[in-house]
Image (cartoon, coloured by chain):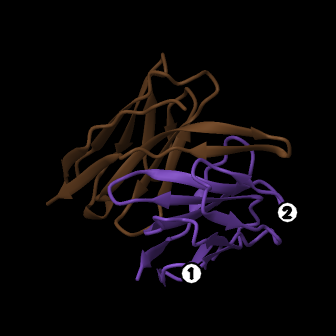
Chain colours: A brown, B purple
């Protein structure tokens, strides 16, 4: 599996943009980068994913470098409800005789604290 | 609303007892997954199922069993062979294929009495 590296914690003021970095230098050409977040004692929430182009949805933007060795998740206007652990994941494809599935290997993530 | 429902939210197991965690989804997803999360750590894959009546072992399947008799249901049994079962268990599902994101339930926290 491609390994990802994230800072253990970050702070962000409410209303400012939160930029969460992730390194995935061993990513292979067909592996996607996914971002999830987890609020304490809840299941992870899907945020966004991408292959090589920048992506944007209603929650966030994902910027992937041209060499695909790193990416940044951007929350444009952070609120207190965005306080969570954010996981950057490279999706690993599982092959078996009835088809294909994929495994999400979650590391320890970045704990984002949004403050007033 | 469509979603994934895990029950119960909290579960206690006695020594030597098997317990079953429920996972139901009404998203019409083909693939379903079980993960385990230990305090301060990431998720690890226990079992996954791509279609009905088929399932595969993940990275830490020992001491666990699953079934997939219906598309919407993927129960996980934690057997007495699992010596360290205390953890947060998460069920996920996806449409299938290699790109679609997995969506998670809110988990079951299992503890040993």
Q: Which residue is mark 1?
A: B17
Question: What mark, if any, has residue B53 been given in the picture?
Answer: 2
* Disc 1 from disc 2: Cα separation: 26 Å
The residue lying at 27 percent from left, 38 percent from top is A7
Q: Is residue B65 visible?
A: yes
- Is B21 left, or right, of B68 in this rendering? left
Q: Nearer the viewer, residue B56 or B16?
A: B16
Which secondary structure, mark 2?
Answer: loop
Q: Nearer the viewer, residue A18 or B102?
A: B102
Q: Is residue A14 visible?
A: no
| Disc nearer the start of the sequence (1/2) | 1
The residue lying at 42 percent from left, 51 percent from top is B42
Give percent across and percent down for residue A110.
31, 46
- Is B86 left, or right, of A34 in this rendering? left
Q: Are marks 1 and 2 in contact (CB under 8 Å)?
A: no
Give percent across and percent down for residue A109.
35, 46
Q: Chain of mark 2?
A: B
Above/below status of A21 relative to A110: above
The residue lying at 77 percent from left, 58 percent from top is B30
Q: Nearer the viewer, residue B71 or A78?
A: B71
The answer to which image quadrant residue A20 occupies is top left
The residue lying at 61 percent from left, 45 percent from top is A103
Q: Chain of mark 1?
A: B
- Is A52 left, or right, of A11 in this rendering? right
Seen as rendered, the residue at the extreme left is A116
Above/below status of A112 relative to B104: above
Give percent across and percent down for residue B45.
57, 52
Above/below status of A21 relative to B27: above
Q: Residues within 10 Å of mark 1 (few under 14, many from 20)?
A: few
Above/below status of A111 relative to B23: above
Give percent across and percent down for residue A9.
23, 46
Where the C terminus of chain B falls, by quadrant?
Answer: bottom left
């Amino acid at each position: 599996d491609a390994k990802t590296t994230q800072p253990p914690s970050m702070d962000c003021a409410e209303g400012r943009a939160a930029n969460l970095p992730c390194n995935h230098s061993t990513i292979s050409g067909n592996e996607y980068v996914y971002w999830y977040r987890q609020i304490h004692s809840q299941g992870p929430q899907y945020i966004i994913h991408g292959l090589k182009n920048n992506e944007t949805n209603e929650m966030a933007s994902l910027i992937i470098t041209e060499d695909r060795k790193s990416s940044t998740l951007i929350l444009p206007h952070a609120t207190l409800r965005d306080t969570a652990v954010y996981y950057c994941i490279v999706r690993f494809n599982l092959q078996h005789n009835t088809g294909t599935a994929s495994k999400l290997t979650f590391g320890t993530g970045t704990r984002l604290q949004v403050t007033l | 609303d469509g979603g994934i429902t895990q029950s119960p939210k909290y579960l206690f197991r006695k020594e030597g007892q098997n317990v079953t965690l429920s996972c139901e989804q009404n998203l019409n997803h083909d693939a379903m997954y079980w993960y385990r999360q230990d305090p301060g750590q990431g998720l690890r894959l226990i079992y996954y199922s791509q279609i009905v009546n088929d399932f595969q072992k993940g990275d830490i399947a020992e001491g666990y069993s699953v079934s997939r008799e219906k598309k919407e249901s993927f129960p996980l049994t934690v057997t007495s062979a699992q010596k360290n079962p205390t953890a947060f268990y998460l069920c996920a599902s996806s449409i299938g294929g290699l790109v679609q994101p997995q969506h998670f339930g809110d988990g079951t926290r299992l503890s040993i009495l």
